[in-house]
């Protein structure tokens, strides 16, 4: 029976005067963060927030996020993190679905949040960037409210790539165990400074960044908006030792190149959220001299499920299961896939969510006999390392042949002119689907779509190479910087060629989009 907020209170007792969080010139010690969080918890209780109530937090990476995150938890309530860039309709779904009693929002997000709240009856409170919540000195409850291990601590909404976003219920035990496993795995300590580029409203940034850093007594340097050059300079200023990011961050930092700042303090880099191309991993390690460890997980798994270990890595691999977690690969016939064969990743352990909020049918479909079915396809080698092939739903079936986009993307990333790449399936009248690729180019580089097509054609089987290739000014991305394939718009010539096919017309009639 341990409240997740004890991550903060325990570290504040052990390291009261050490810096806990920093945003530019604002630095809070563990004692100060603990006090502000306790005051904010008292403020929440005074507003009528009760044990088990849901409270939305819609803030960027500012100091008030950790203050309020732990305040909600220590008051005995449940945190509902929300992207501050959401629009009113999206916010309304989060508030209505979770039944949030209160929403704490940043000033820029307030207009959209207020429109949403009118429809749900949720109270909205605007939180300024640097104004403490509550009244310092008021009587506070220093000890977090008792919570059972299986009580829901956080409801994280999935991205909604397959429909309406669902709320993954992560328990106090889920997040506490996942945090402890990650701290031990990478060896975080009080001497570390962790770069907080990842959004704290997202599972990766929240568990592996915020919770892990504070549990270890390390300092978390907050970055509200990612800019590669600015981030590299922050590494120098704050002597950052651990960088955590998603592949697009590594791509743009690598493109910024060495010499921007002194990054010699970097001792370890963590990548997650999507597959990191091997060429980018090797290039980053060669350029900045810091090892990059890749891991894997989902919102539903708190999030970490597997990781490479320091000194035991394989490029392109997501590593092996973390302590207390099991993985198996499920073949199409329901049996376990043999080493080298492709199967769907199934996960069992302390990290698997309690279930989807108010979605018993979706929960039953996702968790079977205690195993969470991820929807991700992977292989396992003889050493027990796992390699993600692609999302089950991103699989392209061309003329009966299975094509995994990541394989083609890896080839494209090997071209010196390519900065980013996304491979998707587009409808085809006889083959079912055709392979298509959108790319962005590095500055001062030029290459034609035809040249890229021939480049890939020379390196993969004939049925795999993309028949449609186009150069885009940018690729659409989500809040963590993950490329959103569902939002990729093909150029007019590609769109018109597939739009005339009866297969596409049928899919549009059934509500399917052009690109998956």
Image: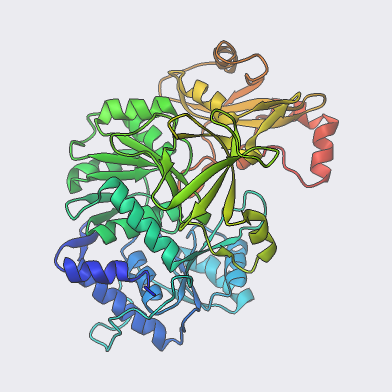
Query: What residue is shown at x 29% (from left), y 46% (from top)?
Result: 186
Left/right of residue 369 with respect to residue 187 in the rendered view: right
Query: What residue is shown at x 28% (from left), y 25% (from top)?
Result: 286
For the question of whether residue 447 can be seen, the reply is yes
List x then y, in percent, for residue 455: 54, 13
Give the total number of marks visible in the rendering: 0
Q: Residue furthest left?
A: 17
Image quadrant assignment for residue 308 = top left
List x then y, in percent, for residue 188: 25, 51
List x then y, in percent, for residue 101: 53, 79
Quadrant where the C terminus sits is top right
Left/right of residue 234 with respect to residue 398 in the rendered view: left
511 or 387: nearer the eye?
A: 387
Query: What residue is shown at x 63% (from left), y 54% (from top)?
Result: 366
* 383 shown above or below 233: above
* 450 shown above or below 159: above
* 200 shown above or below 261: below
List x then y, in percent, for residue 331: 64, 37
Query: What residue is shown at x 57% (from left), y 60% (from top)?
Result: 87
* 122 shown above or below 367: below
For the question of whether residue 130 can be seen, the reply is no
Quadrant where the N terminus sits is bottom left
Colour scheme: rainbow
433 or 472: nearer the eye?
A: 433
């Amino acid at each position: 029976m341990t409240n997740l907020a004890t991550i903060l209170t325990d570290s504040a007792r052990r390291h009261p005067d050490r810096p806990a969080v920093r945003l530019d010139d604002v630095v809070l010690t563990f004692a100060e963060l603990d006090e502000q969080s306790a005051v904010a918890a008292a403020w929440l209780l005074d507003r009528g927030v009760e044990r088990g109530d849901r409270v939305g937090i819609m803030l960027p990476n500012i100091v008030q996020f950790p203050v309020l995150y732990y305040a909600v938890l220590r008051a005995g309530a449940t945190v509902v993190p929300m992207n501050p860039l959401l629009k009113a309709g999206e916010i309304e779904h989060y508030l209505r679905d979770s039944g949030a009693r209160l929403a704490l929002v940043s000033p820029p997000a307030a207009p959209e949040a207020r429109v949403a709240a009118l429809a749900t009856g949720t109270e909205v409170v605007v939180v300024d960037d640097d104004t403490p919540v509550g009244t310092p000195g008021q009587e506070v409850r220093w000890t977090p409210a008792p919570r059972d291990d299986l009580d829901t601590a956080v409801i994280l909404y999935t991205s909604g790539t397959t429909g309406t976003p669902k709320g993954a219920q992560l328990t106090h035990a889920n997040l506490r165990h996942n945090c402890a496993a990650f701290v031990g795995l990478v060896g975080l300590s009080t001497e570390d400074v962790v770069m907080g580029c990842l959004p704290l409203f997202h599972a990766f940034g929240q568990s592996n960044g915020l919770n892990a850093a504070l549990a270890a007594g390390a300092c978390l340097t907050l970055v509200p908006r990612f800019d590669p050059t600015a981030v590299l300079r922050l590494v120098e200023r704050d002597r950052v030792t651990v960088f955590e990011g998603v592949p697009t961050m590594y791509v743009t930092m690598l493109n910024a190149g060495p010499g921007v700042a002194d990054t010699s303090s970097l001792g370890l880099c963590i990548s997650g959220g999507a597959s990191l191309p091997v060429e980018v991993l090797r290039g980053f390690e060669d350029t900045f001299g810091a090892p990059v460890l890749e891991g894997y997980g989902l919102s539903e798994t708190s999030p970490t499920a597997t990781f490479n270990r320091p000194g035991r890595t394989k490029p392109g691999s997501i590593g092996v299961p973390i302590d207390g977690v099991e993985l198996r690969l499920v073949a199409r016939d329901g049996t376990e896939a043999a080493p080298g064969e492709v199967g769907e990743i199934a996960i069992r352990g302390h990290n698997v969510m309690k279930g989807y909020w108010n979605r018993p049918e979706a929960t039953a479909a996702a968790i079977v006999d205690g195993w969470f079915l991820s929807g991700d396809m992977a292989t396992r080698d003889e050493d027990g390392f796992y390699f993600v092939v692609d999302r089950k739903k991103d699989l392209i079936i061309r003329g009966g042949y299975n094509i995994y986009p990541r394989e083609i993307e890896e080839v494209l990333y090997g071209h010196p002119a390519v900065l980013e790449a996304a491979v998707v399936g587009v409808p085809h009248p006889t083959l079912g689907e055709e392979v298509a690729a959108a790319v962005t180019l590095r500055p001062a580089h030029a290459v034609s779509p035809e040249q890229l097509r021939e480049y890939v054609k020379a390196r993969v089987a004939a049925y795999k190479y993309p028949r449609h290739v186009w150069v885009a000014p940018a690729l659409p991305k989500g809040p963590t910087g993950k490329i959103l394939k569902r939002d990729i718009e093909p150029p007019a010539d590609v769109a018109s060629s597939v739009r005339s096919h009866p297969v596409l017309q049928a899919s549009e009639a059934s509500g399917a989009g052009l690109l998956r």
